């Protein structure tokens, strides 16, 4: 996957140079033209169902890549090629040119909006905690975890839940970076952490598959906002982002957007009830 990414990057550079030399396109269209010539868009995902998923045979699915695949097809880019990344590495990877876009449920927040060019909203969700059955420590919020000096919480590195826990006052040494959902589940089952936090739909997917009667979901986490993601493009690729938004808006209007994301449990109405502008200016 990595080698393909490097080859694609070199090919992309060559194509962009030819397009500029031919004067065929403005800088704005060059990126989309490059992706068309390349034949695919390199997307960053986390492999966190139902947002993103990679099957044993390598097939990529999940609400975010499925929306992206359909939109890129409409833009003349035939496919997507996915690389799995930790949330905290997605924006640096995008800025370094390792991905063309992040389609992973990377929630819009002001600090991220300053670093990337987000599309309009796609997937919205609240936050949840996975705990032992009976919620023995009575957690309802990140502040509850902060108050209990013996409590530990697991969360994705560079992820929203890690930030929420730290901002609620949980000390750094009690916020444990967990690489993926399966690890977080196991750590709660083994009592190595008291809670594991992901968005509601991700935790629900984990607990359904675990089929373990000794686990419980606390959702929504009190005091935590409902977030929405968007496809995240590199600053400078706003023309590509705008072209993406045109197709996204058409799909929202026609009902095709709902047809893709709602079987995964997401609400099209929630994404259509807000905007990038509102989400990027949220306090
Ligand atoms: O945007 C984020 O940081 C969070 N989004 C998802 C879909 N899962 C966890 C991650 O922390």
Image (tube, rainbow, N blue to C red):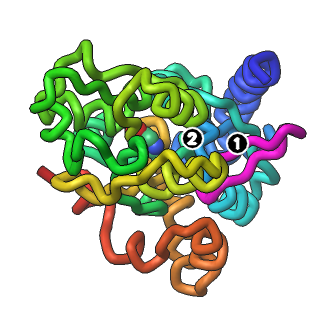
245 or 84: which is nearer to us?
84
Q: Helix, strand, or loop for circle 2? A: strand
Can you give x and y, in whole percent of width and height, for residue 81 in the image? 76, 39
Nearer-N-terminus badge (1/2)? 1
Residue 96, above or below 136? above
Can residue 248 be found in the magenta stretch?
no
Between the C-alphas of marks 1 and 2, the distance is 7 Å
Instruction: Report whether residue 29 is seen.
Output: no
Q: Quadrant of the N terminus?
A: top right
The image quarter containing residue 4 is: top right
The reply to whether callout 1 and callout 2 are in contact (CB within 8 Å) is yes
215 or 119: which is nearer to us?
215
Can you give x and y, in whole percent of width and height, for residue 97 in the image? 57, 24
Can you tell me which quadrant of the image ligand 1 is in? top left
**Horizontal placement of 168 versus 186: left or right?**
left
The stretch in magenta equals 53-64
Does any atom of ligand 1 lie closer than 8 Å to the CB of label 1? no
Q: At 83% from the left edge and 45% from the top edge, which residue is drawn?
A: 59
Q: At 13% from the left edge and 35% from the top edge, which residue is drawn?
A: 168
Residue 39, above or below 261? above
Can residue 61 be found in the magenta stretch?
yes
């Amino acid at each position: 996957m990595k080698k393909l990414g490097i080859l694609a990057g070199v090919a992309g550079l060559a194509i962009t140079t030819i397009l500029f030399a031919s004067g065929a396109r403005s800088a704005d269209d060059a990126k989309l033209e490059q992706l068309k010539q390349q034949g695919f868009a390199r997307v960053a995902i986390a492999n966190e169902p139902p947002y993103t998923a990679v099957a044993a045979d390598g097939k990529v699915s999940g609400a975010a890549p499925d929306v992206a695949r359909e939109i890129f097809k409409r833009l003349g880019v035939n496919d997507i090629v996915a690389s799995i990344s930790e949330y905290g590495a997605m924006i640096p990877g995008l800025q370094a040119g390792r991905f063309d876009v992040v389609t992973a449920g990377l929630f819009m927040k002001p600090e991220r909006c300053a670093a990337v060019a987000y599309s309009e909203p796609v997937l919205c969700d609240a936050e949840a905690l996975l705990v032992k059955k009976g919620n023995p420590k009575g957690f309802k919020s990140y502040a509850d975890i902060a108050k209990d000096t013996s409590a530990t919480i697991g969360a994705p590195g560079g992820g929203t839940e890690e930030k929420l826990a730290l901002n609620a006052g949980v000390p750094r040494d009690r916020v444990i970076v967990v690489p993926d959902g399966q690890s977080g589940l196991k750590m709660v089952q083994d009592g190595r952490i008291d809670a594991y936090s992901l968005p509601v739909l991700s935790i629900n997917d984990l607990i359904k598959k675990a089929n373990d009667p000794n686990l419980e979901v606390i959702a929504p986490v009190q005091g935590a906002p409902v977030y929405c993601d968007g496809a995240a493009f590199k600053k400078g690729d706003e023309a590509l982002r705008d072209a993406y938004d045109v197709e996204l808006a058409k799909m929202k209007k026609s009902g095709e957007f709902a047809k893709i994301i709602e079987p995964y449990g997401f609400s099209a109405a929630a994404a259509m009830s807000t905007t990038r502008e509102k989400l990027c200016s949220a306090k």
